[in-house]
Amino acid sequence: MSPKLFEVVPNFSEGRDAEKVSRIADSVRAVPGVRVLDLHSDPDHNRSVLTLVGEKEPLVEASVALARACVREIDLAAQRGVHPRIGSLDVLPFVPLGPPLSDATLQEAVRLAKMVGKTIGALGLPVYLYGAAASAPHRENLAEVRRGGYKGLVARVGDPLWEPDYGPEEISQGSGAVAVGARPFLVAFNAYLDTKDVEVARAIACEVRERDGGRPGLKALGLEVGGRAQVSMNLTDLERTPLPAALEAVRRSAEKRGVRVESTELVGMVPLSAVLEAARHYLALPELGPEHVLEAALWEGWRDSSRA
Amino acid sequence: MSPKLFEVVPNFSEGRDAEKVSRIADSVRAVPGVRVLDLHSDPDHNRSVLTLVGEKEPLVEASVALARACVREIDLAAQRGVHPRIGSLDVLPFVPLGPPLSDATLQEAVRLAKMVGKTIGALGLPVYLYGAAASAPHRENLAEVRRGGYKGLVARVGDPLWEPDYGPEEISQGSGAVAVGARPFLVAFNAYLDTKDVEVARAIACEVRERDGGRPGLKALGLEVGGRAQVSMNLTDLERTPLPAALEAVRRSAEKRGVRVESTELVGMVPLSAVLEAARHYLALPELGPEHVLEAALWEGWRDSSRA
């Protein structure tokens, strides 16, 4: 049986001072069994995003080490950036990596988020659970938890609807609070159109998304990005709406409006199964599986030998 | 720097006695650093094919262990099967896994094949080098080396054009000889048409293959397989003719003839880059790389940690 793997995507409030960012990331790299897959710093937002993968115990240890490092390195009172934020370690979402990558479930990600929240709370940071880990429906949406940023959160101290789930009620000026959550795996997939007209992108988004009768598990918005109209999508159910189904829905809807998809982009990572599904679909290659991919077979071998 | 990896695809002359096959495969599995990615036995051909991957030294050790096991387990004089064969360990091709999987080259595969050939020759088996490792042009083609099978080879003993490269000139009845070769990595990719007419498949194969002015690095034949016409392809240069280019060439040629590609199949394994190229092409997703694939990033991490 494969191990239960989770992806964690911590956002922390430092994206300009490369040495600080590097020391913070190193605190996680020092934990055996945790893989740092990506580190992206955004100077405008003065914010960095780590992508970690690992099993439960190493991720708890890494989360605590990360929280300590953020408190030590970042003074939120002195920090400026355009992104709304509530803390030095700002957001900490746990994402289960389901089959075929591992057999972790959202319920297990919720338990992991709560365990981490409790431990970070014991360090003296107020912790607000959100997403599938939220303790009440009005706290599920991350945007609600951080409405008004740090100041908004301070203004709600004493409001019984906004007591922290763990840690002290008082929010320190220097380190703020942490939103710890659990959410299903999703793929962020954007299609750029050969038009600048954002209204066309909005009409396509409306036609293809589940909310308005479109594809299951597909969320979509029409945006203008870099002077081009973009259909910005989240695929939350890759079995029912894989990448080709989402793209072909957008292509059909675009064609009706006399426009075309020029190119697409992925934000973040996808499981191998999503890439294989695209190849299966467009190459009419129904039997293609991970057993046909050299690297996947080698990875199995390496993993098995390292666990033996 | 990534390790230099080679794929080895030994063919041995036993495909019916599962216990013998299993003991032969175990001789390879016992070698640390060698991964057995696949084992396929064909009772009709009375023949099995292993797919191994590893670095140079472990593969030399595995090849020698395999040759010993085949000599021990298989009595060629008693062996029957429809496939032409020259030895108990019949064919031993070495294939470099180039970038991005590793930086092994065909020249290194040739050196590896010769090193293995010499070592197996010292065990008392006549060794004929073929492919890129051949010692003369007339011995490059494997079909020429094993023309007439075991009996054909015995008939050529004493012919100066057909001296073995290593080992004794005399060929034992029980274990025969071994063809050891090196060849570039290739992908075997077949397209099934919605017709039974093999002449249509032949015309399409002729139009798309390099030999007749088609796609670079593409070899193709028209065949009838299971009552359906099939365009059977070997892609020997995935950079110049990746899977989508080959398939779209077949689709265009088929359309002109009023037929369609119903489905495709892969025989053997492909590098992740081939699957990514298909997804890039059809999803209009030019930036897609292995760094976007969770498993690939994890594999890098696991490999790095196991080498540290």
Image: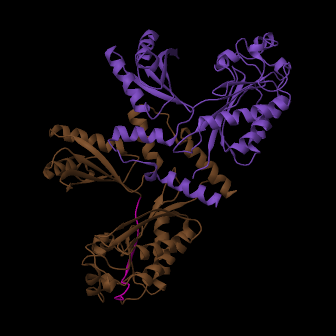
Chain colours: A brown, B purple
Dominant secondary-structure state across the stretch colored magenta: loop
x%, y% of residue B167? 83, 26
- The residue nearer to you, when weighing B263 against B138, is B138
Magenta-colored stretch includes residue B94: no
Q: Quadrant of residue A94?
A: bottom left
Q: Residue at x 34, y 83 (%)?
A: A76
- Left or right, A183 with reference to A204: right
Please determine whether, in this image, residue B276 is positioned above or below residue A106: above
Res B8 seen here: no
x%, y% of residue B302? 59, 57
Magenta-colored stretch includes residue A175: yes
Please determine whether, in this image, residue B273 is positioned above or below residue B264: below
- Left or right, B100 with reference to A86: right
- The stretch in magenta equals A171-184
Q: Residue at x 42, y 46 (%)?
A: A274
The C terminus of chain B: image quadrant: bottom right
x%, y% of residue A191? 27, 48
